Amino acid sequence: MAKQRFVSLDLQSSQECEGVFGKTRLTEPGPRPEIYSIIGAGKSITGAFFGEGATVVGLKSDSDLIELDPRKSQIEISGGVTIAQAQNYLIPKGYMLTGVPSYPGVSIGGCIAGNVHGQNHFREGCFSESLIQFVLAHPDRGLVSVGRENYPELFFLTVGGFGLTGLIVSATLRVEPIINQQLDVFFDRFSSIQEGYDKLASKRNSARYFHSWVDLTSTSSKEGKGFFYRADFASKSEGSFQAVSCSANKKNHLRYKMPVFSKLTVSAINKIYYQKNKKFPKTTQSLVDFLFPSAGRLWYFSMFGKKGIIEHQVLIPDEFVTKYLKRLMDVLRTKRPFISLCHIKYFSGKQKFLNFNGSGLCLAMHFNAGSTELETLELIDKLNCEFNCITNILKDSRVPRWAIKEQYTEYDQFVSGLQKFDPRRCFRNTLSQRLIDVG
Ligand SMILES: Cc1cc2nc3c(=O)[nH]c(=O)nc-3n(C[C@H](O)[C@H](O)[C@H](O)COP(=O)(O)OP(=O)(O)OC[C@H]3O[C@@H](n4cnc5c(N)ncnc54)[C@H](O)[C@@H]3O)c2cc1C
């Protein structure tokens, strides 16, 4: 059978696998593959949808189900539908999905399996906050309708469970009404990450959406200056419906990966961006543009040459933020890695199994995947363990198993829960093979 090469967005892993097959591959009679991996839209940065020896299965986007029940403010939707398709169906009807990631070309199944977050975790929580139930397909168990009440353990093993319990065929999700399709956006300057965190924490109740951008290209003299973005629905309703643009089948990478982004070029870009925001501290933006700043920007991942990048995202408990940031800046000043992008958000949630959820400061940094940066990340792994932080498993391709075992207090429960539900462990991928699977 023909194999296909899959490559992760960050360029840190690639694999030849059989696939992509539709969901019938899971249940059809005859000899079955030993290992499956599940693909949604294939946009997870670490390529968590393929794996060594795995047969890749997914849901074809042409069998898309989207059905709104306005009385219940609920939607029934296929796991293969993208966030862009869902929002484009909902927004003209006056509704939207919440807790959605900044890139809309991802699938509903991928959002559940990653339990992703959006531009206001403090208010909306992770994607699973709006999840009522889902239908799961498993070769040994058939189709199971899973809710918090009837299968609590399976529900939480699947939410943020990286596709290791089976294929999410469809889901029922709560939707929210839209007040306005335009947002008033305010930019507020800060001169250090600590100050950025203070702004996020103190203004957490005062805005519909908020997050911050930090410039870490020059840590020699600065502590990470940046902008705090605060957005609320505009008082005046202007403009017509703006569609979320994102092609479902768009290729992940450009054909040629030129190292266009370097410390020099990104530092110059950041300076221009900073001056522009300083000059225009208030603007009106469409809801869609604010929610999806990464739409149409996958080319970014091809701009660092063949080595690619590592995204490191960490959640720091409030009580350790000040100490952590001080130590982090010491590491960055000593090692001077190339960090092309850094953003911070404020989280409020409850941690479960291997979900990237909890409360405190969420800090994301994109490192060029060079040797200095890898050494820096090893130091940061230790820092994370020292300050009870958790690393986003779905974002960082190199975080080692020991760090995840130390950071996630329910690691063992997750692994034994998987084993109990599926003793054959039919579903595996790059992520589980690095962090969970034995043998
Ligand atoms: C530019 C960019 C910006 C991003 N911004 C954010 C952000 O703001 N917040 C955030 O939290 N994340 C963000 N992400 C990460 C992204 O939202 C997640 O990785 C998401 O899981 C990708 O969905 P996908 O459909 O592409 O899944 P895939 O990459 O195909 O798969 C991801 C995981 O989900 C599993 N999976 C997929 N579909 C199913 C299914 N139907 N049933 C069971 N398991 C399934 C796979 O097995 C795999 O383990 C961003 C990613 C990119 C590329």
Image (cartoon, helix red, strand yellow):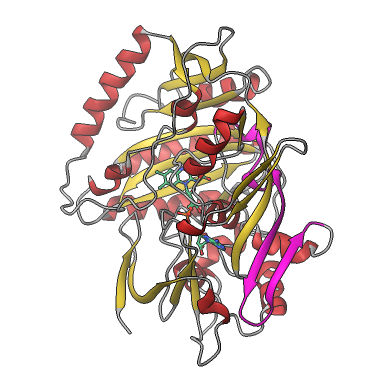
Residue 61 % position (x, y): 46, 57
In the rendered picture of this protein, how many numbered marks are placed on residues?
0
Identify the residue at image location x=58%, y=43%. Answer: 315
Identify the residue at image location x=65%, y=54%. Answer: 171
Instruction: Left or right? Give the position of 246 relative to 69.
Output: left
Instruction: Left or right? Give the position of 433 relative to 303.
Output: right
User: Toward which corner of the image does residue 360 lie, by quadrant?
Assistant: top right
**Residue situated in front as seen by the camera: 258 or 23:** 23
**Residue situated in front as seen by the camera: 175 or 349:** 175
Residue at far bottom of view: 31
Can residue 343 be seen from the camera position used here?
A: yes
Residue 54 % position (x, y): 44, 78
Using the image, determine if residue 150 lies above or below residue 27: above
**Residue situated in front as seen by the camera: 213 or 146:** 146
Using the image, determine if residue 57 lies above or below residue 140: above
Magenta stretch in the rendered image? 119-148
Residue 401 % position (x, y): 52, 67
**Residue situated in front as seen by the camera: 24 or 198:** 24
Assess whether residue 139 is covered by the magenta stretch: yes
Residue 63 % position (x, y): 51, 59
